[in-house]
Image (cartoon, rainbow, N blue to C red):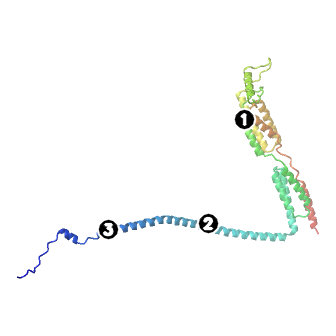
Amino acid sequence: MPTDTTTKPEASATPGDVAEARPKPKSGRRAGWFILALLLVLGLASAVVAVWRPLQVTLTTQAATQARLTSQLEALSTWQATASDDLSALEGRSRGLAARINQLGPERLTQWALAEADYLLRTAQRAAQLDYDPARAALALDLANATLAPVSGSDSLRASIDALRAQLRSLTIPDTSALAEELAQATKILQTAPLREPGVLPSEARPPGWRGALQHAWQQLGDVIVLQRVGSPVQPLLRPQEAQYLRQQFALKLASAEYALRRRDTTAAQSDLGDLEAWASAYLDTSEPAVADALATVRRVAGLELRPPLPDLSGPQEQLATLRRTTAADRLP
């Protein structure tokens, strides 16, 4: 019996099996790798930017510093070149001066020293007599003494100059600027001080404590009850225009006294300040402490000698003239 060698077809596959049998696409994996690479690139770019910005600021600052240092170095080089030129010129002039001094010789140098000392002594005398400047006169004498140091036979003259210089430096000269400032402060107080009617005695300063209170009560009682001799004339009161005129006279006297003070005119200053003190004692209320202090300042300034006498500076000039004649006679053959 013949056998059936034909094979039966297999059962048909289902759609689900066909889908499982197909290979899965790789697009999802590629997208993930792409996103990861993009994130890495962005991170590296952010890191580079974060590092580059401070580095760029540092480089800019260093470039500006380098430019500034370069400009300073150029300026220093220019100054060094100028200083070198000046130093060279100074050295040339010094050599020229030394050559001239060598050409002059001792005799010419002595003549120059005597002429310079004569000029300095005249300057000192003019500063003392005309300008009344003892400090400048002492400085001129000091320079004259140093100029005469190399001159032989000038020991006695230099001793006289030293003595006069010591006298000038020992003088106490009032500072007119400081005195004028003190007088200006006293002026402000006296111009605004309360007036006192003529004939009324100034009230004494009130002591502190219960004695001051008792004295104040007695003064108030005296203002209420006025005792006056019968038949004595009544002192007239100051009218407003008279009070204004009095204050104007105060201002004029103070201005005149300040002008005399700055001119070191002792007589005029004492006269103006004396009148001012007399008027203040007659018309101002001197019981006020500020007014009393201002009057004390006026009296103190009036008692000062604004121009103390200075020593006579003509002696060294006579000695210098004698020394010059002696030196000229020694040079004669």
Identify the residue under disc 1: 191
Q: Position of residue 233 (x, y in %)?
A: 79, 20
Q: Nearer the viewer, residue 157 or 123?
A: 157
Q: Label 3 to label 2, Cα distance in Å?
A: 61 Å
Q: Tell which circle, 2 or 1, labels the residue nearer the N-terminal end.
A: 2
- Quarter of the rendering occupied by the C terminus: bottom right
Per the image, label 1 sits on a secondary structure element best described as helix
Q: Nearer the viewer, mark 2 or mark 1?
A: 2
Q: Label 3 to label 1, Cα distance in Å?
A: 102 Å
- Quarter of the rendering occupied by the N terminus: bottom left
Q: Going 85% across and 61% down the picture, which residue do you hit?
A: 147
Per the image, label 2 sits on a secondary structure element best described as helix
Q: Tell which circle, 3 or 2, labels the residue nearer the N-terminal end.
A: 3
Q: Position of residue 246 (x, y in %)?
A: 74, 32
Could you tell me the amino acid type at mark 1?
Gln
Q: Going 46% across and 64% down the picture, which residue do you hit?
A: 50
Task: Tell me: 182 left or right of 323.
Answer: left
> Does 315 sit above or below residue 20?
above
Task: Tell me: 131 left or right of 322.
Answer: left
Please identify the residue farthest to the left as the structure is shown: 1
Local packing at callout 3 (Cα closer than 10 Å; few below 14, some 14-19, many 20+) is few
Identify the residue under disc 3: 31
Q: Nearer the viewer, mark 3 or mark 1?
A: 3
Asked if marks 3 and 1 touch (Cβ < 8 Å), the reply is no
Task: Tell me: 145 left or right of 208.
Answer: right
Identify the residue under disc 2: 72
Asked if marks 3 and 2 touch (Cβ < 8 Å), the reply is no
Could you tell me the amino acid type at mark 3?
Ala
Could you tell me the amino acid type at mark 2?
Gln
